[in-house]
Image: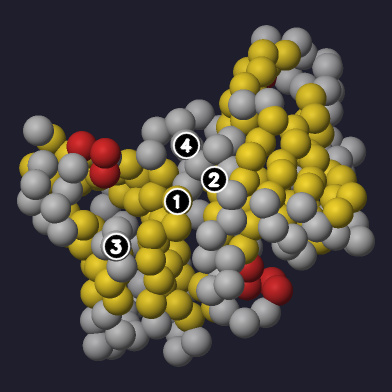
């Protein structure tokens, strides 16, 4: 299994600002995924980040709002731009395992005031 | 990916077996059943997966019916630490697009002392 860390673990931000969340994996992986979990809800996939190509966004999510970087095979960042209170969520990254299972980071709890 | 149906919530006494059902009546022949759980304030955790045979690991057992239209996750001796939301997911393996997971609402399992 992969070991994944995220920074920051939590943050409180003012509306209109941006926050960049980091995801670090202990092994090289081609694909990384970013999810959002709004309060009391299940996880929703934001985008798939492949190293060396543009991220693929799911319906309802756009690059201007959630730009993603994938500079190498062990690291990715997700930026939440021009934040509003509706962006208050837990943001999680994940990577696939050898049997197409997925391993998740601990999440970043974001509160926008 | 095939749709799954799970009870919204269940409870189980500590020390007893917790049996969590999942209905996936539209599953196709090349789709696997995966189970994850999410303990409060943590990222989801992979538990087990299977195709048609019953599977067991150190965390749980997975029983898949012969027609593959339903399955049951069994936690043999539930503890308070097993209190979590459990997600049953059906998905194809074998190509890059299959790596992403679409989460449903899951079953909220409460273990009572």
**Parent chain of label 4:** B
For the residues labelled 4 and 2, say whether their Cβ atoms are less than 8 Å apart: no
Q: CA gap, disc 2 to disc 3? A: 26 Å
Residue A36 in the figure: left or right of residue B8: right
Q: Chain of mark 2?
A: A
Helix, strand or loop at label 3? It is loop
Image spot of residue A54 (x, y percent): 90, 57
- Quadrant (top left/top right/bottom left/bottom right) for the C terminus of chain B: top left
Instruction: Indicate which disc, 1 or 3, sits on the residue closer to the N terminus.
Output: 1
Task: Look at 62% across and 63% down and name the residue there.
Answer: A96
| Mark linked to residue B45 | 1
Q: Which residue is more in the foreground, A67 or A16? A: A67
Closest to the camera, between mark 1 and mark 3, is 3
Q: Are marks 3 and 4 in contact (CB under 8 Å)?
A: no
Q: Are marks 1 and 4 in contact (CB under 8 Å)?
A: yes
Identify the residue at horizontal 30%, vertical 85% (top origin). Answer: B53
Q: Is residue A80 left or right of residue B10?
A: right
**Which residue is situated farthest in the front direction here?**
A26
> Neighbour class for label 3 at 10 Å: few (<14), some, many (≥20)?
few
Q: Give a yes or no on whether discs 1 and 3 share a subunit.
A: yes
Viewer-proximal residue, B56 or A86?
B56
Residue indicated by mark 3: B58
Residue A43's disc is 2
In the displayed structure, B9 sits above or below B7; it is: above
Q: Position of residue A61 (x, y in %)?
A: 76, 45
Residue A82 in which image quadrant: top right
Q: Nearer the viewer, mark 3 or mark 4?
A: 3
């Amino acid at each position: 299994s992969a070991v994944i860390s995220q920074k920051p673990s939590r943050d409180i931000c003012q509306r209109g600002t941006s926050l960049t969340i980091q995801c670090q994996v202990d092994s090289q992986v081609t694909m990384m995924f970013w999810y959002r979990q709004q309060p009391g809800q299940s996880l929703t996939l934001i985008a798939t980040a492949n190293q060396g190509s543009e991220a693929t966004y799911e319906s309802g999510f756009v690059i201007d709002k959630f730009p993603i970087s994938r500079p190498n095979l062990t690291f990715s960042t997700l930026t939440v731009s021009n934040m509003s209170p509706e962006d208050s969520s837990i943001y999680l990254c994940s990577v696939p395992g050898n049997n197409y299972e997925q391993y998740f980071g601990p999440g970043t709890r974001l509160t926008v005031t | 990916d095939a749709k799954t149906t799970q009870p919204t919530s269940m409870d189980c006494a500590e020390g007893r077996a917790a049996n969590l059902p999942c209905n996936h009546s539209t599953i196709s022949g090349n789709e696997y059943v995966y189970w994850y759980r999410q303990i409060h304030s943590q990222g989801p955790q992979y538990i087990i997966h299977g195709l048609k045979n019953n599977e067991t690991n150190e965390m749980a057992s997975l029983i898949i019916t012969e027609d593959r239209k339903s399955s049951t996750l069994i936690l043999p001796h539930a503890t308070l630490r097993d209190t979590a939301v459990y997600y049953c997911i059906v998905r194809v393996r074998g190509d890059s697009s299959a790596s992403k997971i679409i989460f449903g609402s899951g079953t909220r399992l409460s273990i009572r002392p």
